[in-house]
Amino acid sequence: MEHGTIKGRILTEATTRVHTPSLAAEAHPWCLKLVSGPDAGAVFALGDSALVGREHGVDVRLAETSVSRRHCHLYRKRGGYWVLDLGATNPTRVNGMQVTATPMMDGDLLHCGDLDLKLIGPRNPEHPRITLPPAPDGRDRLSGVLCRSRFREALEGECARRQGDGALALLVLDVDHFRHINDRFGFAAGDRALKTLGRLLLDQCRDGAQPGRIGGEEFAVLLPGCPRQEAMRLAERLRQSIAALELLEDGEPVTFTASIGVAALRSSDTGCDPLYGRADAALYEAKRLGRNRVVAFPDG
């Protein structure tokens, strides 16, 4: 995989320092709490993705004229949340600073028009201890693949079942420059791109493979009984298929690519976080090397 025209690479232990993100279960969902306005104190539980705005049908509805119909979009990424401004008349701000897209930390203030909302994580002492009902079929409503919580359950189960034999691989993939699609063609076009990607993953990942959406434009594929080299070949096929996709938006072609990280289960792994951490590190090495490529973390 390191040679020829295939954009694949084996990551060495010395290439990157591994920061281990987690898909671990959270006792309570992240939430937004209104801290200003006539409805101050209202709490909104957040799923993997949430639209904030004034119109009916959004996930966090703020009936205030200073808030745009679709003001901003919050989505899970790397264990936390990102916020994306959707061209609001009164631009989205975080902690007083105008933003287009930025990560948000526990306790940060989100300003939508004249209203302020605080992002509260599950371990924050201010958390109201609300719960979020699970997706009825365990599927992400946009892409059709497993939702984050159901994917985590599947990953944990396979890691426990296959501990010791190493016959398990994980792909983590991220759409390259996804924000450019939203900026140029609009939020609806971004949604269509993610829906198309989900359909492609479901079509091409068979034989027990389980694709899931783990936040924003980040997806993962669980590959039971699959060694790393075979996982790399599948990842490369997916990379090529994604690059070949072409959507039309008002007659203009929309194309995108993806970076993919690959890792295999080790006998020394405890739980699923080490496996996910290695695949995630490989993904970000692929980003660092120029995107639109596959990088694999080495066997232990």
Image (cartoon, rainbow, N blue to C red):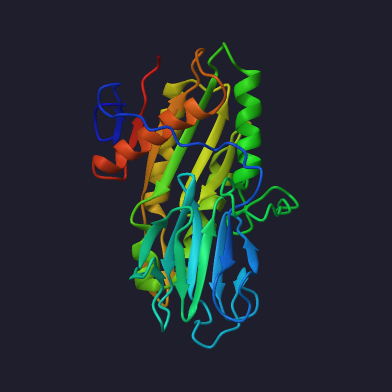
Task: Please state the horizontal and vertical placement of residue 270, each as a whole percent of the image.
Answer: 55, 19
Instruction: Say left or right for 106 vs 132.
Output: left
Q: Nearer the viewer, residue 271 or 97?
A: 97
Q: Nearer the viewer, residue 224 or 29?
A: 29
Residue at the spot x=52%, y=68% of the render?
117
Q: Is residue 233 visible?
A: no
Task: Please state the horizontal and vertical placement of residue 172, each as a whole percent of the image.
Answer: 45, 38
* Residue 167 vertical placement versus 251 (above, below): above
Residue at the spot x=38%, y=33% of the render?
19
Q: Residue furthest bottom?
A: 65
Task: Please state the horizontal and vertical placement of residue 34, each as a whole percent of the image.
Answer: 57, 70
Instruction: Say left or right for 234 vs 180.
Output: right
Image quadrant of residue 287? top left
Q: Nearer the viewer, residue 248 or 51?
A: 51
Q: Quadrant of the N terminus?
A: top left
Instruction: Say left or right for 283 vs 225.
Output: left
Q: Nearer the viewer, residue 112 or 191?
A: 112
Task: Please state the horizontal and vertical placement of residue 123, each as a whole percent of the image.
Answer: 57, 45
* Residue 120 vertical placement versus 111 (above, below): above
Residue at the spot x=56%, y=52% of the render?
199
Q: Is residue 213 visible?
A: yes
Image quadrant of residue 141? bottom right
Q: Quadrant of the C terminus?
A: top left
* Residue 200 vertical placement versus 37 (above, below): above
